[in-house]
Image (spheres, rainbow, N blue to C red):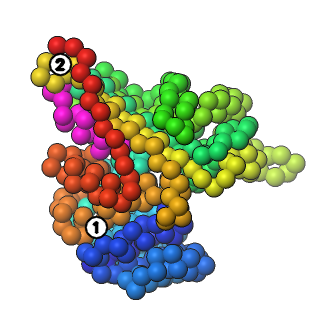
Amino acid sequence: MHIIVLGTGMIGTTVVSELAKFTEIDLITAVDVRQESIDRCLENSNSPKVIGKVASLETKDDIAEVLKDGDVAVACLPHSLSLVTIKAAIETKCHLVDLVGSMFKEKIELHETARDAGVIIVPGCGVAPGITNFLAAQGIEMLDEAEKATMICGGIPRHPVPPLWYQVVFRLESVLGLYTKPAIAVENGQLVELSPLSGLEKMTFPQPVGNCEAVITDAHSTAYILKDKVKNLYEKTVRYPGHWDKMNVLGELGFLDNNPITVAGITITPRAFAERVLAPKMLGASHEDVTVLRVEVSGIRDGILTKFTWEMVDLYDYERNITSMAKTTAIPAAIMAKWIASKKIIETGVVPVESLIIRENFHPFMEELNNLGIQIDFKEDIYSK
């Protein structure tokens, strides 16, 4: 089986390295626009299975040219390339695992086209969206009547510093998009659109994290896929205390807007300006990071009020020498690509993880995550009869 990995940044390189460990995979092509990035990827993976390829990845035709010889692809590309990559995969009849979960409405419209092509497109297959999605879906499956599902996740610094107590663990462009995009959620069984940075909630995670805060962010595909199975569903993103208030002020003042303005004859968007100003303010005291995750699903089972909780506190991986965010994002995508390549997943169309990794697939996938160093604890609470 030939797997193509698009993008060889930290996450893409981790995907390549993990795929190279799987005996089911014969060949991996690591593709990027920069030779130096590919060289680092090849050095890191250190496997005869892996070859590199420099290619343009700007258009659907560019990407289709790369995918035409592949069986499965993993896209580790910017959000702006997600939809065109999906279209290229369908055109070339190459299965695709995409890390990007945004634009789900546009992607699901391609479901029948993908099914007709005989390929599966798995959008949002990282940690969040990704792991959080199928944990929520599995929790709902385990109940007779699901009342509420809350997916909480965040990549935060191991050693935070002021003023924002945050360090960028993926693209700052994507971070600010998360902060400004209205959040799709489910309330009383209906899709709702909530304001960015709303629903501030204080919470605590096990050490070394401690006190945190979370706000509602976009629930991506889960809102659409699970809305008929649960009354209320939210996704929340975690930061250290004080971060959200400061970012909310910037948002209220217009610094995160995308409408161009002209200053001294130069046209720029406030968000682009904010990115340049904020980038050096979003650094931790070290390169170490922490990924926290908590998924809570509550409702009725056998007439009893029950809550299921999955929780993870994952630290920087010194064995792999990668950030926790890179590990917890890349490994689910690598496992999914392997499952597709080995025909453990046989569905076709645009199918998100919350429709795939449930019931009989849930525990085997969780076991593979655990074997590769992603440990997620589970707890069940019973409240009344």
Residue occupying the point 62% across, 50% down: 168
Which amino acid lies under the numbered mark 2 shown in the image of this protein?
A: Ile
Element under disc 2 = strand
- Is 168 placed above or below 163 here? below
- Dot label at residue 195: none
* CB within 8 Å, label 1 to label 2: no
- Is 9 placed above or below 271 here? below
Q: In which quarter of the image is residue 359?
A: top left
Q: Main secondary structure of the magenta part?
A: helix
Residue occupying the point 28% across, 67% down: 338
Magenta residues span: 132-145
Which amino acid lies under the numbered mark 1 shown in the image of this protein?
A: Lys
Relative image position of residue 160 (x, y in whole percent) = 66, 42
- Is 220 placed above or below 347 here? above
List the residue tagged with mark 2.
304
Residue occupying the point 70% across, 49% down: 285
Is residue 141 within the magenta segment? yes
Q: Identify the image quadrant of the N terminus.
A: bottom left
Is residue 153 within the magenta segment? no
- Dot label at residue 338: 1
| For residue 263, side relative to residue 161 (left or right) | right
Seen from the viewer's position, the closer of residues 22 and 50 is 22
Element under disc 1 = helix
Relative image position of residue 228 (x, y in whole percent) = 23, 31
Relative image position of residue 122 (x, y in whole percent) = 31, 56
Q: In the rendered picture of this protein, how many numbered marks are placed on residues?
A: 2
**Mark 1–mark 2 distance (CA, rounded to whole Å):** 39 Å
Relative image position of residue 334 (x, y in whole percent) = 35, 64
